[in-house]
Image: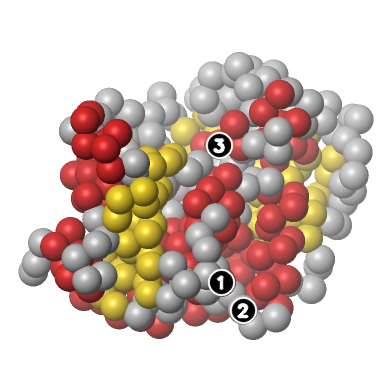
Amino acid sequence: MYEHNQPVVVEELELDDPKENEVLVRTAASGVCHSDLSVVTGTIYYDAAVALGHEGAGVIEHVGRNVTGFQPGDTVILSFVSYCGNCRMCQMERVCLCQTYDVPRGFLLDGTYRLHNSSGDGILQMARIATMSEYMVVPEQNLVKIDPHYSLEKAALVGCGVTTGVGAVLNTAKVEPGSTVAVIGTGGVGLNAIQGAVLAQAERIIAVDIAEKKLNFAKNFGATDVVNAAETDPVEAVRELTDGLGVDYAFEVIGNPKTIVQAYDMVRPAGSAVIVGIAHHASEFSIPAQRFVSSEKRLIGSFYGSCQPRVDMPKLLNLYTEGKLKLDELISRHYRLEQINEAFADMEAGENARGVIVFN
């Protein structure tokens, strides 16, 4: 991305060798996630220019000095967070909230570039990985080793959408069996929040969206009820489906102040509204302060599904192997890297559960 709100460019870049504690990865597949588009629009703000992609898997080609635990030939999922393992948040097993690396967004951990264009200009890497590239030099902290028998295009989805959605339900909210759940936004992450609710044995799972095709996807992934918010008030519809009480848990997976408030409004007293979608960095929302106290509702943020990547991602792949988690069904279409702008357009139109870029 050389300019916000413009089509992205596919071009050849020069890639430096990995430095200390860094690894060269040959990318096998990269998911096309709304967060990538959010970088283009400036919702998730990076200075231009930046190489996109934060959901991927591949094979290690080369390791830099002092890399431990990884070697050439290892198959890996890329995590979009770098964490030290030693700070207070990491010791609390909240590694996605690691406070150690105070490095500007898009730079490697030493504050420098690994990608350069033909003019010699440095190119940032989204999430310090940039999975929409044939090769990546990344910190070893961003790698999760997996069994080589897994399909890497399926494993790539675990790098963001699956972990973020399922984790919001199982890790952040800790949904209990028999609960009622609403999911607002049934794109790639929302569908995985629905899968998480199925895994948690929720009794009723209500999917909310404005696109009929996406609501049909939601049914296939376990939604018991659907609400088209383009045709009815979603808060009233959810309350009607729950005998006027509201759901135990609502998950907002869009990143819109209006739908965040709707999630809060559709949970019952003492229920939990979990905000998963990434809103614009300048956005705010408001709720009545007194009612917040008197209703005892909980409003919770969930970043990356509150996961521990090296613990949770292999578990999710095991669930896939056991037939308890759908990954094959998530992939609606494959794209070549040159089709990235088409992939973004299809995502905005709600055509795909997930599009995947596959590299040779």
Q: Pointer 3: what residue? A: 127
| Nearer to the camera, 169 or 268 | 268
Judge whether 110 appears above or below 56 on screen: above
Under circle 2, the secondary element is: loop
Residue 333 position, x and y percent, is 43, 74
First reached walking from the N terminus: tag 2 or tag 3: 3
Residue 253 position, x and y percent, is 36, 53
Residue at x-position 67% and y-position 73%:
319
Residue type indicated by callout 1 = Leu
Q: Residues within 10 Å of mark 3 (few under 14, many from 20)?
A: many
**Residue 131 in view of the camera:** no
Residue 298 position, x and y percent, is 38, 42
Q: Residues within 10 Å of mark 1 (few under 14, many from 20)?
A: some
Under circle 1, the secondary element is: helix
Residue at x-position 35% and y-position 80%:
224
Residue at x-position 26% and y-position 70%:
242
Q: Residues within 10 Å of mark 2 (few under 14, many from 20)?
A: some
On screen, residue 359 versus residue 344, left or right, reads right
Q: Which mark is residue 85?
A: none
Q: CA distance from mark 1 to mark 2?
A: 8 Å
Q: CA distance from mark 2 to mark 3?
A: 29 Å
Residue at x-position 73% and y-position 46%:
143
Q: Pointer 2: what residue? A: 324
Residue type indicated by callout 3 = Ala
Judge whether 187 appears above or below 330 on screen: above
First reached walking from the N terminus: tag 1 or tag 3: 3
Q: Which mark is residue 199?
A: 1
Residue 13 position, x and y percent, is 57, 38
**Residue 154 in view of the camera:** yes
Residue type indicated by callout 2 = Lys
